[in-house]
Image (cartoon, grey):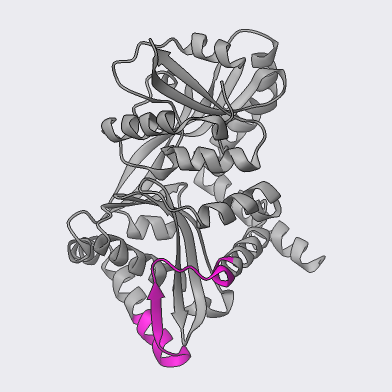
Amino acid sequence: MVRPGDLSAGELEVWRELRAKSGAPANPFMEPEFTLAVGRVRSSARVAVVYEGSEPAAFFPYEKGTVGRGRAVGFGVSDCQGLIAGPELALERDELMRSCGLSSWEFDNLEAGQPLFAPDAAAEYASFVIDVGAGYEAYETVLRRQSPKFFKTTTAKERRLARQAGEVRFVFDERDPAALARLMEWKSAQYRRTGRRDRFAQEWINTLVQQLAHTRAPGCSGVLSVLYAADRPVAAHFGLRSATVLACWFPAYDPEFAKYSPGLVLHLRMAEAAAAEGIGMLDLGRGAAEYKDALKTGEMPVYEGASTRPGAGAVLHWIGREPSRRAHGFVRKRPRLAEFAQRGLRQAGRLRGAGR
C-alpha cells in the first residue's frame, strides 16, 4: 500500500500495460495519471500493488477514511472505477480489503467487467456514449435518423448564433487558462441555480481540474473545448481523453446565450473534432438528461454500491449510506416523484441565489 506518488516508473508502466491488455474501453479515469493527480490533492489516496512473485500484477486505487471506510479514488468526480488487473489473476476480495485495512469500499461508477466487486453492486446505471468510430459523417447520419428534429433545430440555432452574435468558432483543445476559469464560473453558477452542491466550491476538486488541464499523457490528457461567437466564449467543456475515448466531464455555457442551445452545438462540434483526432467514443457519463438521449448512440453499464467485510466499519457504512441510497432509488423509479424532486432543487437554487 503506497501513496500514488510513490509508485515507481516501472510500476506505472505495468499499470498502463494491464489496461491496454484488458479489452475494456480506454477510459482515462482508469489510467495512473488520474490517480496520481488525485494523490496530489487528497492525502487519503492510496494504491495497493498486488505482486505475483517479484512482478506487479494488479493495482487497486482507493481512498481510506476513518474506521476503515474506503472509497474509490476521486469518489464523487471519477466516472470510471475499479481494479486494474489481468483476467487471469486469482485474488480474493476480502483478502485485498483486509490488506488495505478497509472494512468497506464504496463505488459509484464501477466499470463493467469487474468480477471482484460487481457482486456487491446495489444499482446499475447507463453511461451514455456517442460512437464516432466510423467517422463523424456516419454519426451524423445516425443522428438524422434517430433524432431528426433535434439535429435540424440544433444546426439551425448554430447558424442563427453566427448571424446574431458573430462568427462561430470551435477549438477542440484550448490552452487559454482564462477559458477554463470561465467554464468553472459557469458550472458553479449552474450548480447553484439548479440547487445542487457546487463541486468547484471544494478546493480539492478545483485544484484537481487545474492539474489535469496541464496533464499530457497518451492515456490521460486534459482537454478543454470551447465554442466562441465573435471570439467570445459561449460554451465550454473540460474532460479527459485517451487515444480512443473522450470522457465528458464538465460542460457548461453562458446563460446569456441559452436561446441558441450553445451546449448542444458544442457537443456536436466535439464529436466532429474527436472523430478527426481518431477518438472512437465519447462517454457522456451516467445520469439521465434530454441532451444525452438526443446525442447518444448507445450505452454501457456502470455500477453503484459498496463491498464490505464483517465488522463495525461495515455497520457504520450501512447506517451512513444505505438509507440515502435506497431513498434515491425509490424516487428515481417514479418519474412524477423525480420531477417533483427536481422542481424542489430548482426552487432551492432560486432561493439561494436571491439570498446572495
| The N terminus - image quarter | top right
Image point 58% across, 16% down: which residue? 100
Left or right of 20 on screen, residue 237: right
Image point 41% across, 69% down: which residue? 266
Q: Bounds of the magenta span?
A: 156-180
> Which quadrant of the view contains residue 46?
top right
Query: What residue occupies the far right of the structure in this picture?
Result: 355
Decide: is 270 above or below 160.
above
Image point 32% across, 22% down: which residue? 86
122 or 33: which is nearer to us? 33
| The C terminus - image quarter | bottom right
Across and down, in percent, residue 265 comes to 39, 72
Decide: is 190 above or below 279.
below
Left or right of 49 on screen, residue 156: left
270 or 174: which is nearer to us? 174
Across and down, in percent, residue 165 comes to 47, 89
> Which quadrant of the view contains residue 75?
top right
Q: Is residue 177 magenta?
A: yes
117 or 89: which is nearer to us? 89
Across and down, in percent, residue 320 comes to 69, 26
Left or right of 78 on screen, residue 24: left
Q: Is residue 244 magenta?
A: no
| Number of disc labels | 0
Image point 37% across, 42% down: which residue? 27
Left or right of 190 on screen, residue 32: left
